[in-house]
Image (cartoon, rainbow, N blue to C red):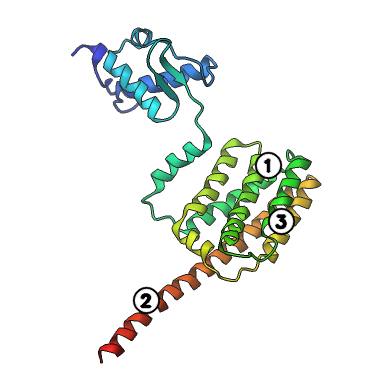
Amino acid sequence: MSERDSPETPATAAGPRRKRTDEIVDAIKRMIVEHGLAPGDRLPQERDLISQFAAGKSTVREALKSLEVQGLISMRTGPGGGAFIERMSEGRAMSLLSNFLFAKNLSIANIYEMRKVLEPQVAASATPHIDEAGLKRLEAIIGIYDHEPADATERWNQRMAELDFHGVVAQYSNNPILAFTCRFLQRLLKDLTIAQDIYVHPEPVSRARGIQHQRDLIVAMRRRDTEAAAAILSVHMAEAEQHMLDLQAKLMDRFLIEEVTPARTRKRRSA
């Protein structure tokens, strides 16, 4: 096999041996950034990439397939076909991360450990940038859950809206990594099985303090008080975590009672 077609490059003092395919993937990513390529732009033709990277056809195709799986490019066939830059949606990025965490046995406490740190920061970073339209959106969202639900469907929608409130706050952050991470944590909470069980269970929920915190946040953001915004969210997240953990404990206790009671009934019937 020639060096051109070698799947790996030698190990050096700078680091361990890397697959040639991975090097080409990184090189193409750098090329996209350096050339300012945007979604819809086409990468150089395959033969040009083969020449540019001094690599075999199979190696270049493997690199392009890796980029396609990552959602960074799409491959089109036929006249005018080739590799085109794609815009990875936030939803796809979150799905990939969720898949990675699928078997990690995430808990409510895991998620809130992060939310308690990051949500106050994202609120502070959003405060100088949110406009009146954004503040009115927050007020409208509160209106979705500032009353008792009429049925199970409304109860679910209210719980989702409570998380959407914080998603809107994150949209106005000037830190895209922080905003994405907070929205990702909110999505994890929506998708977490135990959280879903809590959300659908007809447990009486007192939202008064949480809603007041959110109304106070809107006031702080309207007057551009970043410190107050962070402080309000810090208290709000701590109380929200405790509230969810309390509901989880009640739910687990109820499950245990429901499991034990049928067993006792069966014993009495068999006696």
Q: Is residue 57 above or below residue 153?
A: above
Q: Quote the CA–CA distance across marks 2 and 1.
A: 47 Å
Quick one: which residue is furthest to the bottom in this view?
271
Crowding at mark 1 (Cα within 10 Å: few <14, some 14-19, many 20+): many
Q: Earlier in the sequence, mark 3 or mark 1?
A: 1
**Residue 14: in sight, yes or no?**
no
Q: Is residue 91 above or below residue 191?
A: above
Crowding at mark 3 (Cα within 10 Å: few <14, some 14-19, many 20+): few
Q: Quote the CA–CA distance across marks 2 and 3.
A: 38 Å
Q: Are marks 2 and 1 in contact (CB under 8 Å)?
A: no
Crowding at mark 2 (Cα within 10 Å: few <14, some 14-19, many 20+): few
Q: Residue at 59% of width from left, 56% of height from top?
A: 157
Q: Residue at 40% of width from left, 10% of height from top?
A: 79
Q: Secondary structure at mark 3?
A: helix
Q: Earlier in the sequence, mark 2 or mark 1?
A: 1
Q: Quote the CA–CA distance across marks 3 and 1.
A: 25 Å
Left or right of 4? Residue 229 is: right
Which quadrant, please, contains the C terminus?
Answer: bottom left
Amino acid type indicated by mark 1: Ser
Q: Quadrant of residue 156?
A: bottom right
Residue that label 2 marks: 259
Camera-side residue of 23 and 87 = 87
Residue that label 3 marks: 143
Q: Position of residue 117 (x, y in %)?
A: 58, 51
Q: Residue at 62% of width from left, 55% of height from top?
A: 162
Front tag of 2 and 1? 2
Q: Earlier in the sequence, mark 2 or mark 3?
A: 3
Q: Which mark is residue 113?
A: none
Q: Position of residue 33 (x, y in %)?
A: 51, 19
**Residue 220: in sight, yes or no?**
yes
Q: Quadrant of residue 46?
A: top left
Q: Which mark is residue 125?
A: 1
